[in-house]
Image: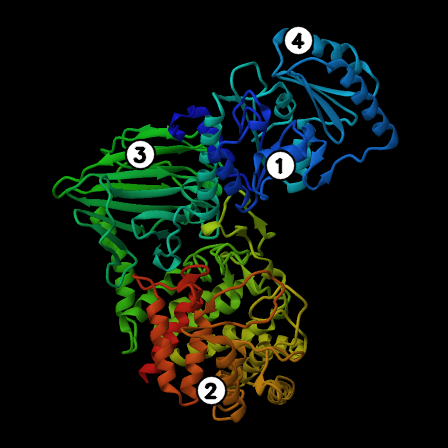
Amino acid sequence: MTAEALPAELRRAIVQLARTPRLLVASDYDGTLAPIVADPEQARPLPESVNALRSLAILHETTSAVISGRALRDLATLSRLPGEVHLVGSHGSEFDVGFVHALDANAKALLRRIETELEAIVDDHEGVHLEVKPASIAVHVRRAEASVGERVLDAVRSGPCTWEGVQVTEGKAVIELAVVETNKGHALDILRHQVGATAAIFLGDDVTDEKAFARLSGPDVGIRVGAGESLAEHYVKDPADVATVLAFLLEERRAWLHGDQAVPIERLTMLANERSVALVTPDAKVNWLCHPEPDSAAIFADLLGGPAAGHFSIKPEHGSLPLGQRYLPGTMIVETRWSRLLVTDYLEHDLASHRTDLVRRISGSTNAVITFAPRPEFGQVPVRLLRERDGLRVVGTSDPMVLRSPGVDWEITSDGVQETARAVVRPREGAAVLLELRCGTDDISEHALAESVRRDRASGYWSDWAAGLKLPRVQTDLVLRSALTLRGLVHKDSGSIMAAATTSLPEELGGVRNWDYRYCWLRDGAMTAAALVSVGSFAEADGFLAWLHGVLETIPGPERLHPLYTLHGTQLGAEAVIDTLPGYAGSRPVRVGNLANQQVQLDVFGPVVDLVVQLATARGALSDADWTMVQAMAEAVSRRWHEPDHGIWEERHVPRHHVYSKVMCWLTIDRAIKLGEQFGRELDPSWVPLRDTISTDVLKNGWNDEVQSFTTAYDGDDLDAASLFVGLSGLIDPTDERFQSTVTAIEAELRSGSTVYRYHRDDGLPGDEGGFHLCAAWMIESYLLTGRRTEAEELFGQIVAAAGPTGLLPEEYDPVAERSLGNHPQAYSHLGLIRCAQLLSQ
């Protein structure tokens, strides 16, 4: 039997159950896992059910159990179930982790009295036997003649069953008398509590299983095997159907937890306008889009939860792999092509701030299948889809949403909670099929401008900007793509700049190092704006500094700045976990918000002041507002530079005196001095001696003679790639032997082939992570400063090779598995690539 043969209502229930954060799968044994046979000692479970239960048990956050009336020792011997599956015997009085109830003297005496009485009742009755268990005795009459069995059971009912302290459980051809209060429902409750299950499924065939069915509620699923009245909502015919149910549950659970063939991160391509971002897979599935802002909840979160979390897909009806995907040169417009099908995607420009419009253009000469599955609020809000004359209206969202699709005949289906639209279209010669997703409006009417005009406008927005850039001769096209990517992370309305376009893409597959980067870090934003200044674009730096001025107006002074803010400059709410999403390739939890918001990071002033220097130098003018901010930041450093902090990597443990943070404090004062001298501004007389004091402190306490390197912090001998900034910042001359030795030490400990790790110390979090592209870029610059150009060129070539087919880079790279990790695309990685290409071009 295949899963398709199961009742549709049961399939829908299983699909929903499979997506619960912590699942308990529990089943009866006889008549459920094992067919009923004449000799109970020959009742063997179906191999398919055993395999499914074991496979479920080894999945993340999934527990399998068998709750049987049999004695635990007999159940274990007969079932031969693997150790991963928990066994509960005697209707719940015996667990494989020990007795739930310890028998006192009175209970033991009662059990002996019951046994004596039952032996007398069943004596000389053929086909009747007693099963003595640690806390109960069962009278089995299945092998006896019907009249004999009924006489025995009547005698038991009128005899020991009436005794005080005896708990009676009656099933098919069996009565069990226990001296402790227990039943399968109680056992199910204990298991649920032990594993913290958010939902459970129970399968059973006997009247004793009704007590377990009675304990089910909410998202739980109860399945009765065979006919008969039951509290279970669903029925299947026999143990063979049970095997099918378990196999289907396994398939759905595994797909939900591990991602259905998760697309390699670096192969995801970003769409962007001046406000919104989206991600497209290599086969034209939009699997990530948030609205109304990039740091809002997702409409399509297939990236983190599979198809059930929302997607918008287009593919040939008679499928084949795409031939390729590319950006139109100098734009953020993406083309995905098959031999007879072309899909063109872009986000519209010149929209009101509350709008996010995605345009998808299908052209070619073959049938295409479209699947539209919006799932607002990360899939937590059920939606309905209503057919309109020219498209679909999404009902159930807090914000209006429509899909304009004239001429498309949609078929709408439901899984019981969410609705999905599907259509097959065939583009006509010279006439493309247009799909326009409009978020933030209920207007489904024809646009005032032709699609070709809007596509040209979107193209021109990027290509006109790109035409004015000053690009290096090394990897010119890739640098251009990096610059476009950085600009795509700029939020034009506010001036803020995202660290990355996504949340919770893992630093280790299956791990917990999954963070939300859809916010504006002062450090990341300043470094991104500086990279764009370096290629000749100043508007982004102006916007970022204006945003920062606005943030500073809300606090008493720069020393009270948080490390990061929302895109509109407000403080972040509490970090939260979305339990209903399994994460990219099973990497949980999925997080929204970022606890780093509450940390002390004293290095943030350095990149901001450095940006002001670079912008003023490039422009030949320094604004009074920017100079006032630089003065305030220098003052903040003078008050706080000697304090410990959480550092650039935002480790979630006790603050330390990080070398990088001290260097950035030094850089703040150093750049303030140079900026004032360059533009004739009055300097604070304390700055020069303060710069010397910080420098002396770093050289004295940051250097470790034993490891011959500047270390992570003053209190240890561990190394950190960020400590390379002792030389990269100019605090010491790159020819200084201490810097050369630091480069060698960090190379030896932290470089691994094509990447460089941040550090290898215990940072208080479980699991591992990849090497950081940004750290590799710092190593390249250090190589160049120390006269090692060959190594610099080699490592740069390896970074280039790690980029995806459309030129995008996430945060990290695993040199062993040779795959990318972390949020994507990451500003750090692209600004590092730009910097290295510029240096290698000199």
Q: Rounded to the nearest whole Å, what is the CA distance between mark 3 and mark 4?
A: 62 Å
Mark earlier in primary sequence (3, 1): 1
Residue 500 image point, x, y percent: 44, 60
Residue 362 image point, x, y percent: 22, 44
Q: Which residue is mark 2?
A: 678
Tell me the element at label 4.
helix
Q: Which residue is mark 1?
A: 76
Count residues near mark 3 (Cα–Cα under 10 Å), then give few for <14, some for 14-19, many for 20+: some
Pick whichever, 205 or 469, lies toward us: 205
Mark earlier in primary sequence (4, 2): 4
Mark earlier in primary sequence (3, 2): 3
Q: Rounded to the nearest whole Å, what is the CA distance between mark 4 and mark 1?
A: 30 Å
Q: Which residue is mark 3?
A: 422
Which quadrant holds the N terminus?
A: top left
Badge 1 amino acid: Ala
Q: Are marks 3 and 2 in contact (CB under 8 Å)?
A: no
Tell me the element at label 1.
helix
Nearer the observer: mark 3 or 2; the answer is 3
Query: Going by the image, does 172 lie left or right of 477?
Result: right
Relative to 692, residue 649 above or below: above
Badge 2 amino acid: Gln
Residue 747 image point, x, y percent: 48, 80
Which quadrant holds the C terminus?
A: bottom left
Pick whichever, 767 or 343, lies toward us: 767
Q: Is residue 57 visible?
A: yes
Badge 4 amino acid: Val
